[in-house]
C-alpha cells in the first residue's frame, strides 16, 4: 500500500535550543498561539532542590508528564511521579510552581498547554498504567480531544483513524525510535501533521514509547 504523504513539520531533538531560566533548563518544542487546540509543548529539567514557575494564560488546560524523578506542584501535598499524569483546567491565568521533590537528583517533565473550553477550574492526578504493550492507552480523561500513549515492541505496526476530519496530529517519541507516517523519529523528536485522516506508525526499537494528540 502506498502511503500518501501529509503536510508535516518535524522538530528534531538534535537541533533543540535549551534555554536556562533561573535554575532550570527549558526546551520549547512547539508553539502555536492562533490556530489549534495545542498552544505549547515544552520539556523542562528542574535542578536539584529547585523549582520552576510556569506562567499560563486564561482559559488554559495544562498536562504534565513526569519523564524522570518526582515533582510537587503548588501546594498539593502528594508528589507526582512518572506513573501519574497531572492536569489543570483554569479559567484564569496564573502560575504553576513545579518543585523538584527528590534531593540530589534532577527532575525532567513534559508540559503541554492547550486551550480550555470549559467554564470551570479544577486539577486532577490520574494514574498512568503502561502495563499493556502494543496498544494505545488514553493519557488523560480530562482532555476533551483524543490523547494517547503507547509502549511498543520492535517492528510492531499500528494504524490510527482520526476521530474528526480536519484535525491535526502532534506526536512525540518519548523513548526509542519509530517510523511515524513514513518519517523517522527518535527519542524526544516531535512532529506536527496536518491534512491527515489515517496515521500509520511502526516501532523500530524495543520498549519504544510514543505520545500523540489529535488537535
Image (cartoon, rainbow, N blue to C red):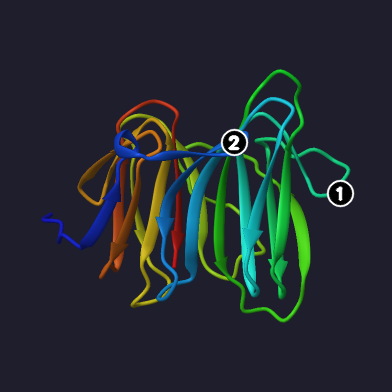
Quadrant in the picture for residue 160: bottom left
Please tell me how crowded label 2 is: few (under 14), some (14-19), or many (20+) other residues with Cα within 10 Å: many
* Image quarter of the C terminus: bottom left
Position in image of residue 205 (x %, y %): 34, 27
If the image is split into quadrants, where does the N terminus sit?
Answer: bottom left
Label 1 element class: loop
- Residue placed furthest toward the front: 22
The one nearer the camera, 48 or 146, is 48
- The extreme top residue here reads 104
From the viewer's perspective, is residue 185 above or below residue 34?
above
* Label 2: element kind: strand
First reached walking from the N terminus: tag 2 or tag 1: 2
Closest to the camera, between mark 2 and mark 1, is 2
Residue under label 1, please give it.
75
Q: Count every numbered label the image shows and give the total.
A: 2
Residue at 11% across, 56% down:
2
Residue holding disc 2: 24
Question: In screen coordinates, is 118 left or right of 2?
Answer: right
Q: Position of residue 105 (x, y in %)?
A: 67, 21
* Closer to the camera in the image, 213 or 120: 120
Amino acid at each position: 500500500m502506498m502511503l500518501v504523504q501529509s503536510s508535516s513539520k518535524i522538530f528534531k531533538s538534535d537541533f533543540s535550543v535549551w534555554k536556562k531560566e533561573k535554575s532550570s533548563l527549558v526546551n520549547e518544542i512547539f508553539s502555536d498561539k492562533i490556530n489549534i487546540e495545542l498552544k505549547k509543548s515544552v520539556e523542562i529539567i528542574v535542578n536539584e532542590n529547585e523549582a520552576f514557575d510556569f506562567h499560563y494564560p486564561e482559559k488554559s488546560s495544562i498536562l504534565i508528564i513526569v519523564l524522570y524523578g518526582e515533582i510537587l506542584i503548588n501546594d498539593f501535598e502528594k508528589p507526582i511521579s512518572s506513573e501519574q499524569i497531572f492536569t489543570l483546567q483554569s479559567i484564569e491565568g496564573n502560575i504553576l510552581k513545579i518543585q523538584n521533590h527528590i534531593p540530589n537528583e534532577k527532575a525532567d517533565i513534559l508540559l503541554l498547554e492547550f486551550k480550555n473550553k470549559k467554564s470551570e477550574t479544577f486539577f486532577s492526578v490520574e494514574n498512568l498504567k503502561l502495563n499493556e504493550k502494543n496498544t494505545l492507552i488514553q493519557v488523560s480523561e480530562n482532555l476533551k480531544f483524543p490523547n494517547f500513549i503507547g509502549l511498543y515492541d520492535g517492528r510492531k505496526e499500528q494504524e490510527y483513524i482520526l476521530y474528526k476530519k480536519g484535525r491535526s496530529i502532534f506526536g512525540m517519541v518519548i523513548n526509542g525510535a519509530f517510523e511515524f507516517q513514513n518519517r523517522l523519529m527518535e527519542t524526544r523528536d516531535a512532529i506536527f501533521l496536518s491534512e491527515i485522516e489515517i496515521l500509520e506508525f511502526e516501532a523500530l526499537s524495543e520498549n519504544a514509547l510514543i505520545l500523540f494528540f489529535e488537535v
